[in-house]
Image (cartoon, rainbow, N blue to C red):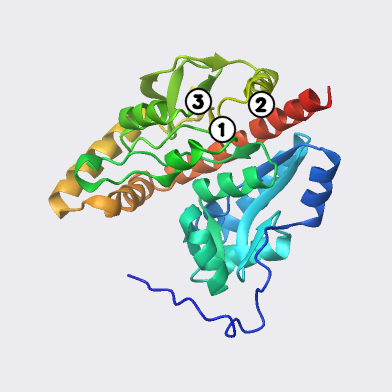
Amino acid sequence: MVQRRVPGPTSYGGGVTDFHIQHGAEVAEALRAGRPVVALESTIVSHGLPRPDNLRVARQIEQAVRDAGAVPATIGMVGGRLVVGLDDTELTRLASADGVAKLSVRDLAVAAAAGVDGATTVAATSAVAAASGIRVFATGGLGGVHREAAQSFDESADLTTLARTPIAVVCAGVKSILDVGATLERMETLGVGVVGYRTRRFPGFFVTDGGFDLDWSVDSPEQVAAVLAARAAHGLHDGGLVVANPLPADEQLDRDLHDRTLADGLALLDRDGITGKAVTPYLLAHFHSATEGASLAVNVRIILRNADLAARIAVAAAGTVAG
C-alpha cells in the first residue's frame, strides 16, 4: 500500500495556501457568460490510457467538445491546486508524470493539503463540476457494484456521489465486468435518474446492450435539456441524471470476443484467487491483453462519442436557460 504523508502548513515547498477551486481562463469566462461548458475527468488521462496515447486522446476529447459548440473543462489537481479547465501544460503534466494520485471525492482535501498531482474520478469530477455550476459531464463509463460485492462491499463512490450531485453524466453505461444488474438496482435505490439515449436497453460499455431494460429514453439533446430544466424548476431532487449512450452495434467490441474474454477472465479469477478490489483491474488488463488492444480502441470511441453528445446537451441546456 502506498502511503502519502500530509505535510504541515510550513512544508508545502512554496505551494498551495489558497485551497479554493481554480478555473482556467477560458472556462471562467464561459461560465460568466452563460456559455455551454462540459466537464471532463482526468483519470482517463493519467490512469485509463497508456502513454503516449493518453495525451493525444485527451486533446481529441477536448476538441470533440469544441467541435460541438461547447467549452471543455478537464478537471484535475496540479501541485495541490484543484483546477477546472486544465491548460495544455497542466494536461501534459498529468499525462506524463509518475505517481499521479487517483482522487475520489473523499481524497480531494487531503491531496490538496499534501500538494500532490492528482486525477479526478467520475465521482470527484461530478462533485467539482457541479460546485462550479457545470451541469453536463462526459465520461466513458460509470463505476458501479463490483462482482462479489455481497462479500467485499466493493461499490464505486460514483453511485453515492451522483445521488447528491445535480449533474447530467453522459456515459456508455458500466463495464460488463461489473455487476450490471446490481448497479442499476443501486441507482434506483439512491434516486439516480437513468435515461437511454435513443435506446430502452442499458449499454454494457464495450457492447451496445448490457442486458437490462430501462424505463425511460430520450431521442435528442433538447429532450435531455428539458429533463434538466424540469428538475431545476421542480426543486425536489439534487441527484444526478445518467444519460446512457450506447455505441452503435457496428462499433462495439465483437460480441463473441467479448463474451469469450469475459468468461475466460472470470475463470482466471477463480484460478488465481483474485478477490475484492483487485478484481476490476485484473479483468480490465485481461480484456486488453486477450483482445490484443481492441477493447482499448473501443474505449476511445466511447469517450469521443460521449464528449460530442455531452457538448450538444450543454448547448441545448444553455439555450433553455437563455430562453
Q: For the residue marked with disc 1, what is the amino acid?
A: Asp
Please say if 170 is above or below 2: above
26 vs 118: above or below = above
Can residue 154 be seen in this snapshot? yes
Helix, strand, or loop for circle 1?
Answer: loop
Residue name at image x 51 percent, y 30 percent = 251
Disc nearer the start of the sequence (1/3): 3
Image quarter where the N terminus lies is: bottom left
* Residue at (79, 51) in percent of width and height: 28
Dot 2 alpha-carbon crowd within 10 angstroms: few under 14, some 14 to 19, many 20 or more: few
Q: Nearer the viewer, mark 1 or mark 3?
A: 1
Q: In this view of the protein, which residue sits in the foreground, 237 or 173? A: 237
Q: Quadrant of residue 179?
A: top left
Q: Which mark is residue 232?
A: 2
Residue ID for mark 3: 193
Contact (Cβ within 8 Å) of mark 1 with mark 3: no
Position of 118 with respect to 314 (left or right) is left
Assign a secondary structure to mark 2: helix
User: Nearer the N terminus, badge 2 or badge 1?
Assistant: 2
Label 1: which residue? 238
User: Which one is nearer the viewer's eye here, 80 or 230?
Assistant: 230
Task: Look at label 2 and name its amino acid.
Answer: Ala
Which residue is pictured at 53% across the width and 60% down the height? 108
Q: Which of pointers 3 and 2 indicates the residue nearer the eye?
A: 2
